[in-house]
Image (tube, rainbow, N blue to C red):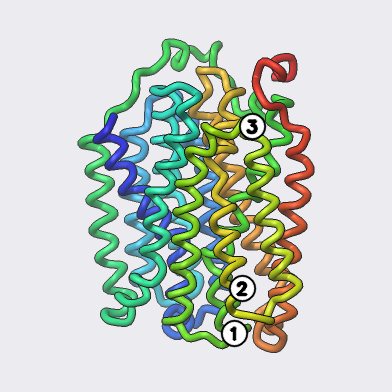
Amino acid sequence: MGPSIAILALGYILSQFYRVFLAVLADDLSTDLGATPTELSLASGAWFIMFALAQFPVGIWLDKYGPRRMTAALFTLGAGGGIFWLSIATTPVHLIGAMGLIGIGCSPVLMAPIYIFAKSFSAARFGLLAAWFVAFGTIGNVAGAKPLEFLATQFGWRPILLGLLVLTVAVGVAVLLFVKDPPQDEESHDPAAQSSFLSLLKMKSLWPIFPLMAVFYAVPVGFRGYWIAPYLSNVFGLDSAAVGTLTLWMAIAMICGSIAYGPLDRWAPSRKWLCITGGTLVVGSMLVLAVWTASSLSLATAMLVLCGFAGMGYPVLMGHARQFFPPSAVGRGVTLLNFFSIGGVGVLQWTSAALISDETIQNAPVSAFQMLFWFYAICLGIALLAYLAARERPDIAQSNG
């Protein structure tokens, strides 16, 4: 499975890039397309919402047929088509539609390797493999910061997108040619043995996990994906080069966090309390920023780095929930969790765009972002309280599932 994972990792790097690159291109898109901060946030949210909705057909296809053909088709046509549309966009509506299409195209590129890990390796190794795969893919998060800012300055954003179009299509074709599907269970093709999404939603052992899955990843990625640029520019008066630098620091922290969670998943006595610890650190960083929103750029940078590092517990939380899935529903299970995770980013992005208006950002930026940080802290705090009721292992929760 080595070559398969390597090629899928290239697709995931691009997926990570596409979910955050609007933060760096915000000024160019505002100038060329007339996009307001709210419209840019809606475009970022469209990526996550469409990505999340696509998880349902992706999960069904994974369990029935495997990842190769579906991933190749969606990534080539969806992500490639969306990038082409964005490269010729002339209005904010085009921007929002293109980002939604790119989200659909990127929807299988993490679930495909997660499915392969779940089918091919033990549950004990699942969290480590998933965490390191996510860490490697987060290179795209870094590429969508300072490197993109430099290239966009040198060549313009439209030529950069055309180059990305070629790369995206090449990766999609490589998936079709070189990725191998893992062996299928006999019951994967037996309708009577398959668990539906509805039956998974009825599993009480998963209920406390869903809220945290919806918010944990959404806070660092939602802020890094868009809000970091208007926050730093409006509150601290930074230019695009300085924003790119601090965005890079947060992106590097997210890579380091993903790497750290891998071995911690094996060493920690409890996945549950590892996630609670990471989530509590993220809540703490948001509370500090809510109280001292504009007091110090150094403090703001430190808190954003902490948020990025501690907020990468997604693979551990996925590994916690993975224990409860029946073998015939691994594809549906991981994509259902990913629906909550990515959908949570989109919902929080759109909610935050409604919470703080363009006028408020321009006239009272400190108050606007104080409200945003309180909103993030409260949402994640509520999810952590719900997660306290989560079971540690399937044997304890067998009667519930």
Q: In the image, what residue type sits under mark 3?
A: Ser
Q: CA distance from mark 3 to mark 1?
A: 40 Å
Amino acid, disc 2: Ala
Q: Which residue is mark 2?
A: 300
User: How many other residues sit within 10 Å of disc 1, few (<14), some (14-19) or many (≥20)?
Assistant: some
Residue drawn at 56 percent across, 38 percent down: 316
Number of the label disc, if any, that sits on residue 236: 1
The residue labelled by disc 3 is 270
Q: Mark 3 and mark 2 in contact (Cβ < 8 Å)? A: no
Type of the residue with mark 1: Phe
Q: Residue at x 44, y 75 (%)?
A: 244
**Location of residue 269 in the rendering, given as x and y in whole percent from the top left corner:** 62, 30
Q: CA distance from mark 2 to mark 3?
A: 31 Å
Is residue 279 rendered to the left or right of residue 115? Answer: right
- Residue 289 left/right relative to 106: right
Element type at mark 1: helix
Instruction: Tell me the CA gap for discs 1 and 2.
Output: 10 Å
| Residue 322 image offset from top left, x and y in percent | 56, 28
Classify the position of the N terminus by image quarter.
top left
Instruction: In this rendered view, identify the residue nearer to me: 248 or 184.
Output: 248
Q: Residue at x 28, y 41 (%)?
A: 6
Residue at image x 31%, y 37%? 5
First reached walking from the N terminus: tag 3 or tag 1: 1
Give above or below for 120 relative to 295.
above
Residue 310: give its label.
Answer: none
